[in-house]
Image (cartoon, rainbow, N blue to C red):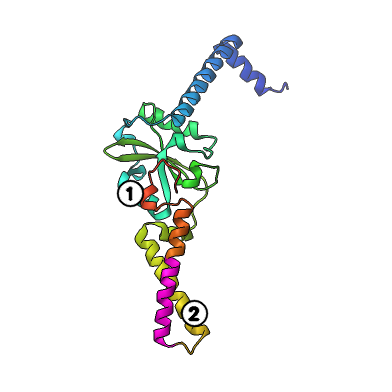
């Protein structure tokens, strides 16, 4: 019994519906449109924001992806991140980012623009694997999350950047470090009296406040509350 070649069957069935030349022309048009769409999305990611917002279909939006500017600000300050225009982003996008954006555009029947990114400061200067999040504005200081990629943050990051949240936190940190070293001095030299430990503490406070603040500003750093949405490179 003659065996059936499914590939040949497929070819014959396809040729009944469309010729090879027609198929080639059809595919070429599809590829041209897709290339054009990818170029437009890439250009949108590289364009400066003009202040307008995106019109998304309310029934198609996922509530979990909608965030107010104040919420974003609080997270940026807490983890020392920045929330800036995508054209300032120097990291790498996922390879499928245009597909992700295109799918959302198709769902909402619109072309997205004015992209924003929440990411560590260094991602706006050098490449890094840390965790960026892409947003678009949707009006009234609300933003819609498009995609998140990269590695998750270690919870320790929150503690490490806590002293740099504002001037009060850095001062408190300096005092706590001074308390630690004053108590350590008492353990190393048990003969120290409480008065002497207190004097040592005052000396350490002045020393550490000077060292931390001088080093902080000497290296052109700034507090998280000041730089979360700053386009300047003092971070």
Q: Position of residue 151 (x, y in %)?
A: 52, 49
195 falls in the magenta region: yes
Q: Position of residue 39 (x, y in %)?
A: 50, 24
6 falls in the magenta region: no
Q: Quadrant of residue 138?
A: top left
Residue highlighted by disc 2: 184
The span picked out in magenta is: 193-209
Instruction: Identify which residue is drawn at 45% across, 56% down.
Output: 216
Q: Is residue 20 above or below residue 37?
A: above
Residue highlighted by disc 1: 71
* Main secondary-structure element of the magenta-colored stretch: helix
Is residue 38 visible to us here?
A: yes
Q: Nearer the viewer, residue 13 or 92?
A: 92
Q: Quadrant of residue 2?
A: top right
User: Regarding mark 2 in the picture, which secondary structure is present there?
Assistant: helix
Instruction: Identify which residue is drawn at 51% across, 48% down.
Output: 130
Mark 1–mark 2 Cα distance, whole angstroms, equals 40 Å
Q: Quadrant of the N terminus?
A: top right
- Residue lying at the far left in this picture: please name it: 140
């Amino acid at each position: 019994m003659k065996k059936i070649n499914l590939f040949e069957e497929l070819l014959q069935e396809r040729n009944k519906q469309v010729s090879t030349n027609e198929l080639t022309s059809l595919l070429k048009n599809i590829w041209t449109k897709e290339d054009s769409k990818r170029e437009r999305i890439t250009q949108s990611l590289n364009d400066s924001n003009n202040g307008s917002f995106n019109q998304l279909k309310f029934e198609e939006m996922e509530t979990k992806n909608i965030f107010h500017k104040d919420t974003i600000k609080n997270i940026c300050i807490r983890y020392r991140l920045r929330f800036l225009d995508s054209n300032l982003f120097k990291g790498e996008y996922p390879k499928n980012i245009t597909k992700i954006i295109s799918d959302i555009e198709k769902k909402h029947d619109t072309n997205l623009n004015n992209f924003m990114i929440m990411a560590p400061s260094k991602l706006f200067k050098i490449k890094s694997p840390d965790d960026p999040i892409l947003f678009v504005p949707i009006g009234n200081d609300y933003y819609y999350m498009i995609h998140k990629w990269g590695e998750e943050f270690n919870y320790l990051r929150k503690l490490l950047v806590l002293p740099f949240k504002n001037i009060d936190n850095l001062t408190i940190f300096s005092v706590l470090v001074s308390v630690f070293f004053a108590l350590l001095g008492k353990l190393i030299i048990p003969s120290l009296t409480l008065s002497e430990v207190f004097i040592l503490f005052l000396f350490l406070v002045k020393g550490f406040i000077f060292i931390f603040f001088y080093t902080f500003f000497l290296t052109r750093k700034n507090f998280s509350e000041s730089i979360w949405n700053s386009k300047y490179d003092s971070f």
